[in-house]
Image (spheres, grey):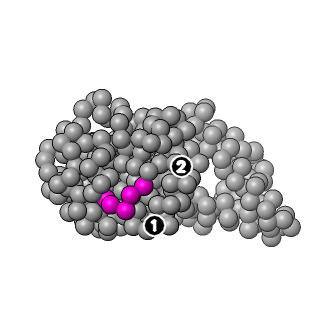
């Protein structure tokens, strides 16, 4: 089975790394194309895969074709490759905002289309990927797609209606989490802690909190209450965050992200 990547940016590299770590495919079973020679050489040196400067050549050879380019680049790419995609090829897109129907209108039918909505923690094998498919994708093909997505983190099937929501929550939220970690560290630095140490403490606190939530399955409000001792220090900070509208600000940010996605 040949897995082809059109686009070799950060997300493609995260996926390739996961696929190789989990031994889903060997380096010689992966081929990729990129607009720049420097990127092709860097990816080939890092992963040992074969790279091409031709999108058509990747599309012609791949049994699983992963479109890992920006949404704005997709129209000319599909125009270029659609006549070279095999009838049995499974097409996977990681582009936000481009619905299955959008692909079906631009590809020779019946096209087997899966959409991934991953996030950047995939770069360290801790991604969160929402997956949906069209009616031409079999259960076996869906399982294969999930196996690929699970190689670089968690993967779950959602309806396409929920895919953009998943993208806004898991795809965009790392930026918000990084801002939160940076703010925590800034506060620690203000109080006298060295910057690097402040980042370590803040990052570990966030990672540990998320792991505690996932592994216990307890409600986040319950876990929050565990930290808030009566008359203690944490509840004082919680009151400030409530006064400053932290929850509403986060909800507004997700809503803004969703609205932008609809306009892509």
In the depicted structure, whether residue 5 falls above or below residue 28? below
Q: Are marks 1 and 2 in contact (CB under 8 Å)?
A: no
Precedes in sequence: disc 1 or disc 2? 1
Q: Quadrant of the N terminus?
A: top left
Residue at the disc numbered 1: 37
Q: Residue furthest top?
A: 140
Q: Quadrant of residue 233?
A: bottom right
Q: Residue at x 28, y 30 (%)?
A: 139
Residue at the disc numbered 2: 47
| 255, 85: nearer the viewer | 85
> Of helix, strand and loop, which one carries label 1?
helix
Q: Residue at x 28, y 51 (%)?
A: 59
Q: Quadrant of the C terminus?
A: bottom left
Distance between the alpha carbons at the discs numbered 1 and 2? 15 Å
Crowd class of label 1 (few under 14; some 14 to 19; many from 20; radius 10 Å): few
x%, y% of residue 89?
Answer: 25, 42
Q: Is residue 160 left or right of residue 210?
A: left
| 88, 126: nearer the viewer | 88
x%, y% of residue 55?
Answer: 31, 59
Residue 50's label in the rendered image is none
Does residue 30 appear in this view?
Answer: yes
Q: Quadrant of residue 183?
A: bottom right
Q: Residue at x 36, y 41 (%)?
A: 2
Q: Is residue 241 left or right of residue 8?
A: right
> Of helix, strand and loop, which one carries label 2?
helix
x%, y% of residue 105?
Answer: 15, 56
Magenta span: 51-55
166 part of magenta stretch = no
Does residue 236 appear in this view?
Answer: no
| 114, 5: nearer the viewer | 5
């Amino acid at each position: 089975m040949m897995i082809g990547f059109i686009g070799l940016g950060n997300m493609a590299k995260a996926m390739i790394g996961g696929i190789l770590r989990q031994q889903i495919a060997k380096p010689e079973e992966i081929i990729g194309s990129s607009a720049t020679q420097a990127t092709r050489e860097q990816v080939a040196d890092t992963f040992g895969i074969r790279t091409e400067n031709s999108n058509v050549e990747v599309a012609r050879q791949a049994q699983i074709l992963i479109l890992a380019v920006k949404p704005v680049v997709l129209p000319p790419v599909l125009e270029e490759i659609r006549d070279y995609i095999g009838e049995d090829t499974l097409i996977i897109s990681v582009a936000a905002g481009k619905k299955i129907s959008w692909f079906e209108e631009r590809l020779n039918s019946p096209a087997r289309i899966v959409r991934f909505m991953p996030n950047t923690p995939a770069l360290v094998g801790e991604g969160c990927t929402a997956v949906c498919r069209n009616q031409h994708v079999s259960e076996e093909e869906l399982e294969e797609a999930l196996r690929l997505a699970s190689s670089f983190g968690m993967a779950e099937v959602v309806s396409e209606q929920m895919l953009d929501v998943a993208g806004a929550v898991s795809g965009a939220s790392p930026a918000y989490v990084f801002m939160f970690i940076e703010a925590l560290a800034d506060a620690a630095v203000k109080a006298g802690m060295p910057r690097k140490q402040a980042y370590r403490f803040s990052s570990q606190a966030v990672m540990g909190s998320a792991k505690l939530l996932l592994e216990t399955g307890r409600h986040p409000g319950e876990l929050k209450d565990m930290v808030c001792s009566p008359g203690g220090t944490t509840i004082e900070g919680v009151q400030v965050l409530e006064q400053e509208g932290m929850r509403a600000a986060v909800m507004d940010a997700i809503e803004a992200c969703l609205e932008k996605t609809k306009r892509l």
